[in-house]
Amino acid sequence: MTDARSSGGPHGADAVWLVVGLGNPGPAYAGHRHNIGYLVNDELARRLGASYRSHKTGRADVVEGRLPASSGGVGPRLVLGRPRSYMNEVGGPVKALATFYKVPPERLIVIHDELDIPFDTMRVKLGGGDNGHNGLKSIRSSLGTGEFYRIRVGIGRPPGRQDVADFVLSNYSAAERKVVPFQADTAADAVESLVSEGLERTQQRFNS
């Protein structure tokens, strides 16, 4: 029997995975809670030793590379995508990248902030609703399905009566900023695990 991880199966060296970190483009948004997906993809790009470049679709920047295989040789191929559009319009660029790289929804991973998960925790899942997240809503609309993987990075609920939109589009607190790099590092580990080991093992390890 051929091992899918060493062949053309979903976790094999021939498989292409599209990993999209959600956020809003531009320096004004860089430190916002809504931009944690960008930070995770930046960490993955650092691990791949590559820099973002403009993709020929003109709607996103990408990094391409391969994960190391646990048994030696080459591992699955990753395409890290950073849409140039704002959060509520990311679906078009994501679909364009998925079409270009011939990536089906079951090899798409979307990294995003999650209000209903406490800060410094995360969940990995396949499919599900949008839970009011405009980025997920846009991707679902463009792809015609929500059956893609999500790395849900917790930011918690706003304190007091602060508006949710104001909260996600605000900077992390000083205390949180000390933790965010470690949170991004852990989420990057979860992406690598999901691609290499599959959903069940990843959930067992990271769904805190």
Image (cartoon, helix red, strand yellow):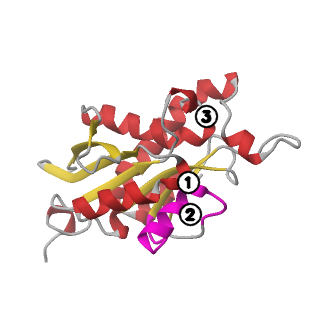
Q: For the residue labelled by badge 2, is the local secondary structure a helix, a strand or a loop?
A: helix
Q: In this picture, is 179 found above or below 147?
A: above
Left or right of 147: which side holds 107? left
Residue 117, image x and y in percent?
Answer: 67, 51
The span shown in magenta is 130-148
User: Horizontal placement of 67 versus 31: left or right?
Assistant: left
For label 1, the crowd category at 10 Å Cα-Cα, with few meaning under 14, some 14 to 19 and many 20 or more, is some
Tell me the CA gap for discs 3 and 2.
20 Å
Residue tagged 2: 137
The dot on residue 58 is none
Residue at 54% x, 60% y is: 136
* Residue 25 screen position, x and y as percent: 48, 37
Residue placed at 54% from the left, 39% from the top?
35
- Residue type, mark 3 in image: His
Residue 140 visible at all: yes
Q: Earlier in the sequence, mark 1 or mark 2?
A: 1
**Pointer 2: residues within 10 angstroms few (<14), some, or many (20+)?**
many
Check disc 3 and report the residue beneath it.
32
Asked if the magenta segment contains residue 180, the reply would be no
For the residues labelled 1 and 2, the Cα–Cα distance comes to 8 Å
Q: Nearer the viewer, mark 3 or mark 1?
A: 1
Of discs 1 and 2, which sits in the foreground?
1
Residue contact at pointers 1 and 2, CB within 8 angstroms: yes
Q: Which residue is mark 1?
A: 88
Image quadrant in which you'd find residue 188? top left
Look at the image and say whether residue 134 sits in the magenta stretch.
yes
Question: What whole-number distance in Å separates the C-alpha atoms at marks 3 and 1?
Answer: 16 Å
